[in-house]
Amino acid sequence: MIIVGNWKMFRGPEPSALVGLDAVVCPPFTRLRDCVEAGLTTFAQNVHWEPEGPYTGEISVPLLVELGVVGSLVGHSERRQYFGETDETVAKRTRAALEAGLRVIACVGETQDERERGETENVLRRQLSALEPHPDLVVAYEPVWAIGTGLTATPETAQEAHAFIKSLVDAPVLYGGSLKPENAAGLLAQPDVDGALVGGASLEVDSFKAICETAARIPS
Ligand code: PEP
């Protein structure tokens, strides 16, 4: 089970409070160093495809590696929705990071509209076809309608999407979307759910710990 906390643009908990947890954290850039120094498995929330250059506001693989960061999220739906991220830029970021030795969690998922129109599988197929297989690639299935909304996919809905994703890519698949201590067990128990990408509930030490403890109890 892989449990990942995405702190988004929040300060997040004190890294020392998470020492010893079997989890990955994705803090904002200014907190990466503190997390690395506390010994946490630390990922960035985004990474550029060029090793350096005039790209204000972006961060490169070498700069992350120098800090001790070991991976990055790529293509989070908030990047796709608000910052113009496309399947093509997601693919470029993913390829550059993997080639340079970072692990990548690539996020995919359909919007409410796309689900209602019966487009879920087409959207997932399109998003995934931009990615090449790699041993350090993990996919996060994050239905956009469930992120930060309090709406969670039922375990059956998540399982169905995860099984479809696994029919297309050979990679662990994490579920993300309003996962909390109360709904974690049902989702994580699904056969094709290999872990979770947790947003809001990773900002509180107690709830993140509770999710990690639930994950540890699920037989692999
Ligand atoms: C996320 O940010 O990836 C996420 C799943 O957020 P939340 O858990 O808050 O829905």
Image: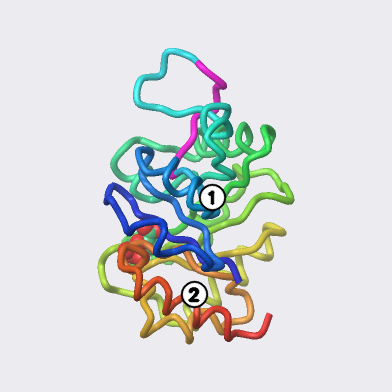
Q: Quadrant of the C terminus?
A: bottom right
Q: Nearer the viewer, residue 134 or 199?
A: 199
Q: Main secondary structure of the magenta part?
A: loop
Image coordinates of residue 105 in percent, x first then y, are 55, 51
Q: Kindly identify the residue that appears in the image at 35 percent across and 54 percent down.
A: 7
* Residue interval drawn in magenta: 45-52
Residue 49 is a magenta residue = yes
Residue 138 lies in magenta, yes or no? no
Q: Residue 106: give its label.
A: 1
Task: Please report the residue visible at 36 percent of the width from the left and 76 percent of the height from the top.
Answer: 180
What is the distance, in whole Å, between disc 1 and disc 2 at their CAs?
Answer: 21 Å
Residue 31: % across, % down:
37, 43
- Residue 212 badge: 2
Q: Residue at x 66, y 65 (%)?
A: 166
Say whether residue 112 is visible.
Answer: no
Are there few (<14), some (14-19), or many (20+) residues within 10 Å of tag 2? many
Which dot, 1 or 2, sits closer to the camera?
A: 2
Residue 216: x %, y % from top left: 57, 80
Query: SS of the residue at dot 2?
Result: helix
Secondary structure beneath label 1: strand
Ligand 1 sits in quadrant: bottom left
